[in-house]
Image: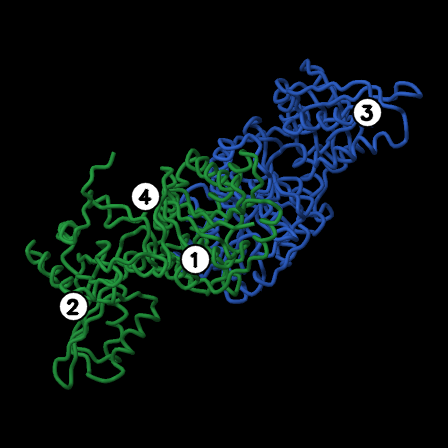
Chain colours: A blue, B green
Amino acid sequence: MSIVVQKFGGTSVGSIERIQAVAEIIAHTYAQGKQCVAVVSAMGKSTDHLVGMAKEICPHPSPREMDMLLTTGEQVSIALLSMALHQKGLKARSLTGWQAGIETNHVHGRAMVNDVKTETIMNALEQGEVVVVAGFQGISPDKEITTLGRGGSDTTAVVLASALKADYCEIYTDVTGVYTADPRVIPLAQKMDEISYEEMLELAHLGAGVLHPRSVEAALQNKVQLMVRSSFVDEPGTWVKEENAMETSHNVRGIAHDLQVARIKVLGLPNHENTLTKLFGLLAEAHINVDIIVQSEHDHERVDVAFSVNEEEGLEARQVLEAAQAELGFAKILYEAGLAKVSAVGVGMMTRPGVAAKMFATLSEAGIRVKMVSTSEIKISCVVERELALEGARRLHTAFGLDQVEVKV
Amino acid sequence: MSIVVQKFGGTSVGSIERIQAVAEIIAHTYAQGKQCVAVVSAMGKSTDHLVGMAKEICPHPSPREMDMLLTTGEQVSIALLSMALHQKGLKARSLTGWQAGIETNHVHGRAMVNDVKTETIMNALEQGEVVVVAGFQGISPDKEITTLGRGGSDTTAVVLASALKADYCEIYTDVTGVYTADPRVIPLAQKMDEISYEEMLELAHLGAGVLHPRSVEAALQNKVQLMVRSSFVDEPGTWVKEENAMETSHNVRGIAHDLQVARIKVLGLPNHENTLTKLFGLLAEAHINVDIIVQSEHDHERVDVAFSVNEEEGLEARQVLEAAQAELGFAKILYEAGLAKVSAVGVGMMTRPGVAAKMFATLSEAGIRVKMVSTSEIKISCVVERELALEGARRLHTAFGLDQVEVKV
């Protein structure tokens, strides 16, 4: 028998009707002779409701208690989905994160999965049961309930698919696949049939929003084939898989944007070998993810470092560094919020001449100033003013020939 | 250091403001140098909301999945109460049923507590933390989430108080103590300063509703002193304790009523020694609690048996017996819902002459027909038509001299 993991996000289980529709999708897969593991998120707005109550009590609730609170959201979903499956005549069993064997480290609010103990799930599958697992949550070595943070349910689905040696993992969401750009802001964006892990990873990191980068990383590491598809519309989605299984085009394949960017400039750091190690070590200890890093050497004595972070973590990053000013020995910190990042992504595109030049020219023609640049084998990212970012993304989508030309029927 | 267990029901934690008020009560106790363990129920109407969603999906949801669903209610409460305690500057730690070591059997929806592993709670108390435990829930030997059914949170509080060797256990509720009758329907009912376990047990069984009988049984067995008091009004409540620590009056001490009674008559059973064993054995296997049992012998061959159950379990009880008609060999079943039970309770009262006579006379004068009677050392119960039950209770309260005479100021 072959195992399929199917993940359903918050909007896919946002109401009783939606949960019943999800049960129908699972029943259809089960009827094809698959062993089914469903991973579900909390129902639509329920997380917001829980967060709202917490904030009423406490401006900065303890991360441990937030995990205790928020994990109830998925627990409600798994129970209701199991009932909906029973109602369709299927055997089904819900499992919380700890029951499903999702073992994490102890970092509340953004725990990492250390291991997956599959015994309980395998036993249930062997008894012909559909297993419904609470996404986003796990258990720490000292039996504390943890959450995986952003994109947690996708990550749960991928690590389960890997541990269970599933044939593939379907990520059901409110869009029909991975697009050449965000179709909500770039109407001419086209759905891709397939995309490599690496490209998806860049698109995910760059704010395409369909999949969280952690889940794509986990899929890449474990060679889990993903299918991103809609739980609302029954049509094929986008396969996310190994590059060597694909026809590569060496072109720009997608344009991504991320509207939550802040930049921190640290001026006048001592020019020592371990300066950057210390600085980014402190940020890592505070679990702050740094994105683009630019260093410029002033003279032999002093360097400036600029880096971008998610705007939500921006002020915390600044505080961490300011508190360590004596230790780091810098002169001054500048903080700028209200920024965004626009990126072009495609395997092999950087070996094609002129891609970077075309990108800068396109933004420049639109009067958009580039504040930071970062390049890799498969992408170019530019940090720009937030209010100009979407216009920039639209122009790049057109410039790189991604706009759909045929009218859809 | 001495440990106090404080239990707060659904109305006591029914809103953010109420949760903050509960945190204040706990902080006050903590400030008196106590080690505090709070046991909380789900917030007010949240259980109803969850049940409503389940019923939308499934008319008869699986008990396992109902437990999975409903236990989220207390988990929300413990997280929010812990946050409210943090906000008051206390160290606090929430624990789900399984984290708190509440080990039960495997009967979903009405599990019995087998054991309490206190290590986690004791460690937290030793670190000066207030421990906030989810009531009503536990974990079965095969690591399934279970619920204790009706009165579950009270039971959690009492078994914890016993296992932790607490000084006493406070049951905070929306009434100020135990009354001589339900003050909502009998305005002249008076609050008692103290009551014996046995009397409380009868009152609880008889539907006084302040404490569930299971929790009083557990308190009696383990000699846990209970204080029933209000979380809304700061005044002394009612101590529930051993009779030998009390001045006993040998009078009727309270009138109870239970408005959810159904009667089942099983007619024409074979008059064998094991007939009753088989009949009530089947009901016990179905986890149906039988209350009053009356047997009458027809002749040497046939007996009739009548018994009362909670009306919610009435139809199920009838189905269980009907399915076993061939095995039991009875002629016919009669089912009557819409009944109620009115009872007079007091340690030693049955040794006083005339109590039963006065009870029957009082009901009879009011035109109330007694359909079943049951007596014990400390109570007389009469099953009557539901619509006459409250009038009967009021008349008994007056007849036994329980009405308050002084006007409260």
Q: Earlier in the sequence, mark 4 or mark 2?
A: 4
Q: Earlier in the sequence, mark 2 or mark 1?
A: 1
Viewer-side residue, A17 vs A115: A115
Residue identified by numbered label 3? A326
**The label number, if any, that marks residue B175 in the structure image:** 4
Pair 2/3: label in front: 3
Give left or right: position of B19 versus B55. Answer: right
User: Of all residues shown, which one is farthest toward the bottom?
Assistant: B300
Chain bearing tag 4 is: B
Give left or right: position of B369 versus A365. Answer: left
Q: Whole-percent x and y of residue B227? A: 39, 49
Q: Whole-percent x and y of residue A43? A: 47, 42
Between the C-alphas of marks 2 and 3, the distance is: 87 Å
**The label number, if any, that marks residue B224 in the structure image:** 1
Viewer-side residue, B221 vs A69: B221
Question: Is residue B265 at least partly visible in the picture?
Answer: yes
Pair 1/4: label in front: 1
